[in-house]
Image (cartoon, rainbow, N blue to C red):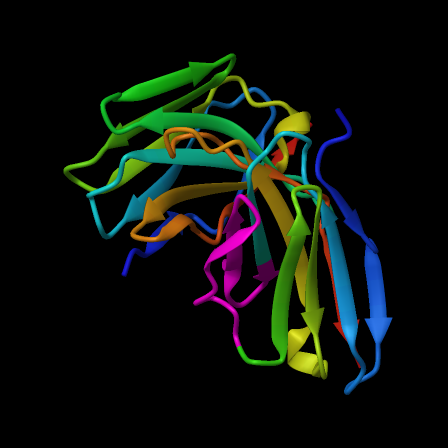
């Protein structure tokens, strides 16, 4: 199994540009999570999906952030327009949710730098 | 709102030493607690998951304990090795949030 795949691994962009991060979850997993990690705030949940449906997006910082999951094997996190304070590592994780006690599997992350 | 605290933030020990990492959480109504490892530039890897009905869980040289009533968990690493150097994070579910993470303890094991 290839694990959770994220692309790109690194992204450098200028303030005001649109940024799209991509995630392919582990095949057969039915839950997908987007996290943001910074030194100051640690790891924060942005949004998560169950069976492709967004369940909780209360962690999405602003309307500039949006996430979609058009099918079970693909999700995107978009930032438009990007700002320097969005610079962070963004992780995608997936899980086979049965009883709510199953572990999440994390991708390698996308390091975003907004100049 | 669940808050997770990990102490210390960083720890440096000589190879071979046994060590304990601490995690505390404010809301004891949890159904499990997980410990993760994060290597530099990498994602998180699950190490141990303790159900609320359990008091401890073991995997190799790692042993995690859970005391729900006091809102604490510890991760014990026996006979530490340089390969154990990483950041260790604990996480608990909270309300609708599947996992709330601590900021981690950065461990360095010196050969």
Residues B11 and A88: in front is A88
Q: Residue A52 location, x and y as percent?
A: 57, 49
- Which residue is pictured at 77% across the width and 87% down the height? A16
Asked which quadrant contains residue A105, the reply is: top right
Q: In the picture, which quadrant includes the N terminus of chain A?
A: top right
Asked which quadrant contains residue A37, the reply is: bottom right
- Which residue is pictured at 81% across the width and 82% down the height? A17
Does B106 appear in magenta? no
Q: How many marks?
A: 0
The magenta stretch is: A36-61
Residues B16 and B49: in front is B49
Does A40 appear in magenta? yes
In the image, residue A114 sits, relative to residue B40, either above or below, namely below
Q: Residue B15 location, x and y as percent?
A: 61, 24
Q: In this view, does B5 lie to the left or right of A32?
A: left
Asked which quadrant contains residue B110, the reply is: top right
The residue sitting at the bottom extreme is A16
Predominant secondary structure in magenta?
strand
Q: In the picture, which quadrant includes the C terminus of chain A?
A: bottom right
- Which residue is pictured at 27% across the width and 61% down the height? B1
Q: Is residue A4 left or right of residue A55?
A: right
In the image, residue A101 sits, relative to residue B27, either above or below, namely above
- Which residue is pictured at 83% across the width and 56% down the height? A8
The residue sitting at the left extreme is B69
Q: Residue A57 location, x and y as percent?
A: 48, 64
In the image, residue B43 sits, relative to residue B100, either above or below, namely above
Q: Residue B51 location, x and y as percent?
A: 31, 26
């Amino acid at each position: 199994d290839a694990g959770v795949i994220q692309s790109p691994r690194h992204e450098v962009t200028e303030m005001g540009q649109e940024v799209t991060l991509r995630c392919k979850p582990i095949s057969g997993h039915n839950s997908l999570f987007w996290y943001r990690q910074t030194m100051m705030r640690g790891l924060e949940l942005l949004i998560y999906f169950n069976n492709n449906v967004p369940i909780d997006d209360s962690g999405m910082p602003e309307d500039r952030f949006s996430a979609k999951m058009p099918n079970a094997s693909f999700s995107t996190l978009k930032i438009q327009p990007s700002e320097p304070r969005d610079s962070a590592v963004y992780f995608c994780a997936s899980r086979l949710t049965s009883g709510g006690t199953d572990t999440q599997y994390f991708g390698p992350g996308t390091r975003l730098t907004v100049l | 709102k669940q808050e997770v605290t990990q102490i210390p933030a960083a720890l440096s020990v000589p190879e071979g030493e046994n060590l304990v990492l601490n995690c505390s959480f404010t809301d004891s109504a949890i159904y499990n607690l997980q410990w993760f490892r994060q290597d530099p530039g990498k994602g998180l890897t699950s190490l141990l998951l303790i159900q609320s009905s359990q008091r401890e869980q073991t995997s190799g040289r790692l042993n995690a304990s859970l005391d729900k009533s006091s809102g604490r968990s510890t991760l014990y690493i026996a006979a530490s090795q340089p390969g154990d150097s990483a950041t260790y994070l604990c996480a608990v579910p909270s309300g609708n949030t599947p996992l709330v993470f601590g900021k981690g303890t950065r461990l360095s094991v010196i050969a």
